[in-house]
Amino acid sequence: MSDKLIPKDPSAVAVIRNITPNVVTVSVPFARFEKIRVGGRGTIIRMTSGTLAVFSPVALTPETKAKVAELGGNVGYLIAGDIEHHIFLTEWKKEYPNAKLIGPKGLPEKRSKMDDPKVGKEQFAFLYDETNAHSNNISEEFAADFEVEFVNDHANKEIVLFYKPDKVLIEADLMFNLPAIEQYSKVPESEKKGASLLNKLFQTLNNTSGEAKAHKRLLWYAISNATKNRAGFNESVKRIDSWDWETLIPCHGETIEGTGKQVFRKIFEWHLRGRK
């Protein structure tokens, strides 16, 4: 049930931060299987039109509502970053009923089968699949500000956004950047202790510092081959790399400001240039 994924008091632990004047992140603690501390992050983007797009929304706290209001309050798009990042869509949709829901193929069916009070049966306005993987034609204002890549050959069916005005790339599970320091920065020190061996191993596999060989191997041998179409995965990575972006906002781990593309190119080197 989703209640295991939500901090008891989200307001007490959420970190709300302006990455640019138009891009705001809401970072929270989150542990997979209650052991692996990957953190969670929602991103609010104020588009050129003034409309807001929210990528992988997290808990809608009073503080987050206040930030939304500060940004103009007109939430037009709620985007599930992949088939895993959708739990809070319903509470945001209730608060901002005019927002269009966007997600990957298969997500409505998954949500319809969930017996969870937090997950509703809302209709999606736009679903990404292999036939529209590069489309930004959700609306004129959306197309003006975003490039989109649907990574169909990632097991989680990733939607990657490039916010052109501020040169920011926003993604869910395509690339982690652990450890999740900001996302756990408001958690009491007593709760940070005693990290499991599994947690330490996962952080090593998803760390971007140094040569990051473990991370590169994880992506090459496991993640990119999950659907048995590494070539398709590689094409998505190459298209993302072709965009003119500088800052990378992942849902899990640290935001990389200014040097995001350099780190991305290092981590995905084998996918961009071929395995050595």
Image (cartoon, rainbow, N blue to C red):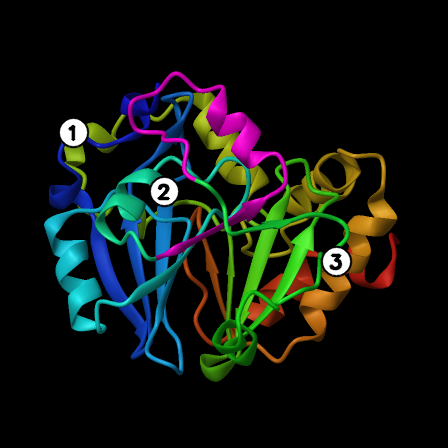
SS under mark 3: helix
Could you tell me which quadrant the N terminus lies in?
A: top left
Characterize the local packing of mark 3: few (<14), some (14-19) or many (20 or more) Cα atoms within 10 angstroms.
many
Find the distance from the CA under tag 1 to the CA under tag 2: 19 Å
Observer able to see residue 180: yes
Of residues 86 and 196, the one nearer the viewer is 86
Residue 30 screen position, x and y as percent: 34, 35
Magenta residues, start to end: 99-122
SS under mark 1: loop
The amino acid type, in three-letter code, at marker 2 is Leu
- Residue found 52% across the figure and 30% down from its top: 201
- Residue found 58% across the figure and 58% down from its top: 160
Mark toward the viewer: 1 or 2: 2
Q: Which residue is mark 1?
A: 8
Find the distance from the CA under tag 3 to the CA under tag 2: 26 Å
Q: Which numbered disc flags the more N-terminal residue, 1 or 2?
A: 1
Characterize the local packing of mark 2: few (<14), some (14-19) or many (20 or more) Cα atoms within 10 angstroms.
many
Residue 133 screen position, x and y as percent: 71, 56
- Residue found 40% across the figure and 22% down from its top: 196
* Disc 1 and disc 2 in contact, CB within 8 angstroms: no
Q: Which residue is mark 3?
A: 236
- Label drawn at residue 89: 2
The amino acid type, in three-letter code, at marker 3 is Ser
